[in-house]
Image (cartoon, helix red, strand yellow):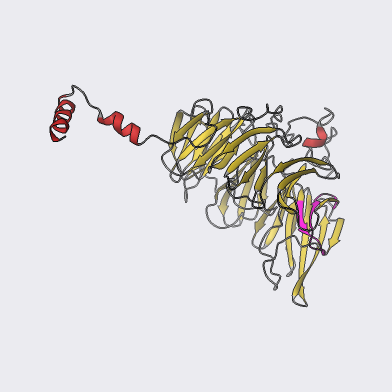
Amino acid sequence: MLLGLAVVVALAATGVWNPFPGLWDWVDRSEPISEPDVVWQQRIGGTPRSVTIAGDTVVVEQRTRVEARSLATGDQLWERKADWSAVAGGDRDPVVAVGKLLVKGYELLDPTTGATRRRDDDAVAVWTYRNLLLDAHCTDATDCTLSAWDPRGTAPLWTAFLPGVSSGLLADNPGLRGTRRLTATRVDDGVAGPEPVPPLLGFPVDGRVHVVDTATGRVLQNVEPGRDERLSIVGGRMLRIAARSQDGTCYFAISARDPATGQEAWQRAGVNLRTADSAGCAQREDPQGARNVLIGVGPDGREAVIDGYDGRLLWAGDPGARLIAVDDRYALFRSTDKRSVVARELGTDRVLWTQPASGKAGAALTPYAAVITDEKPSRLVAVEPRSGRELAVLRTPANALAVGPQGMIVGEGREIGYIRFGATGGAPAPPPGDGGNPGNPGPGGTRPGSGDDDDNCGPKRELCPDPAGGKDG
């Protein structure tokens, strides 16, 4: 054995034959990340902080750099040193914003080539959406300008004055007053990619909330909450959520107002939006929900989904049912017997589909697929949100990192891989259209009057301006 090893070393040293690189490749070969196998699998330099499908590329954010890979092959296209990154734009017009911590400014990169499309040297914060990009410039702590851009635009669509956006340099997507998404084990919080910009945004500044109309840039309200109140901007309304401590419990009341007029639009009492975390009733969290809907718990202990625009009850769960995912269209919940995940269309009593799952199953809703996670065995299942048709069924311990029109990215540690929908299940439904037009924040990209507005404009069409240029919410 020693003689054989000496001969191999001698052959390698003289360049005649070197088996060591191939041997190391065999030792370091990655095991398949899922069963069935993925279309491609790549090992990246570090554990990803976020992964986003941007058109024909996959943008991977790591601790000190960002890189893009081909969605078709997984091959690296470019790499850039950066402390943070965020994707804006839709399927046809994505851009990647990158920057450094504690340094003003950012760059917008082409996701395919990595070339700089636009550079800003002074912005202290950036917010990225499917159809809009916002940045803030501050000459001092109380003098800031908010600007809105088309993701690939070269001139601002509008600008607005704010007396500060907060203290310090805030990098990408600092928190605003809206809703908290439901989370699921093994599903990344940003799995759906950038969302359409809401009709109104609430900027917290020095204890007050400044409400900005994202269509015009007009600052509609500058409100200071009461001592027992929390303000939240949901579905084109400003919610004043009051929590009062009495008899060892919290009593809640919600008043929703039209920010343009200050008039009350609706009110509800007795619904716990989970904004308080103790019997002291101090509200330190935004309400749970998604886009235009809120999640609450009624006096009878049943979970409920409420329309943020008009206060309608869109869904009320049975005793013991547990809501695990929601958006403007659907609610996914674990059945009372904890043997399945059930999908319901909001505002109706119709059950759309049922998927067998354990009592520990989690889920997430994206424009292209509902993703369900389960244990024993560890599985990821992607289904068409309306019909429940299976798009991908994977036996894998990996996490769902990003979902796109034709497939999803899964990952475990430094390994990421791409699953194409239809390879392990039924053919996918046609994907939603592109929301790249800033005049149409809906995920489907249709304009009012096209016949497809209801799914894309929100429950009350508050996401789509009317043809006369006004807004109804």
Residue 321 percent location from the top left of the image: 76, 54
Is the C terminus in the top left, top right, bottom left or bottom right quadrant?
top right
Q: Is residue 308 magenta?
A: yes
What's the magenta region?
Answer: 294-311
Q: Observer-nearest residue: 296 or 335?
A: 335
Q: Quadrant of residue 156?
A: top right
Report the side of 393 relative to 221 (left or right): left
Residue 34 percent location from the top left of the image: 52, 36
Residue 86 percent location from the top left of the image: 56, 41
Residue lying farthest to the front in this orientation: 1
Residue lying farthest to the top in this orientation: 16
The residue at 14%/28% (across/down) is: 7
Q: Observer-nearest residue: 187 or 319?
A: 319
Q: Is residue 372 magenta?
A: no
Q: Observer-nearest residue: 452 or 188?
A: 188
Report the side of 68 relative to 427 (left or right): left
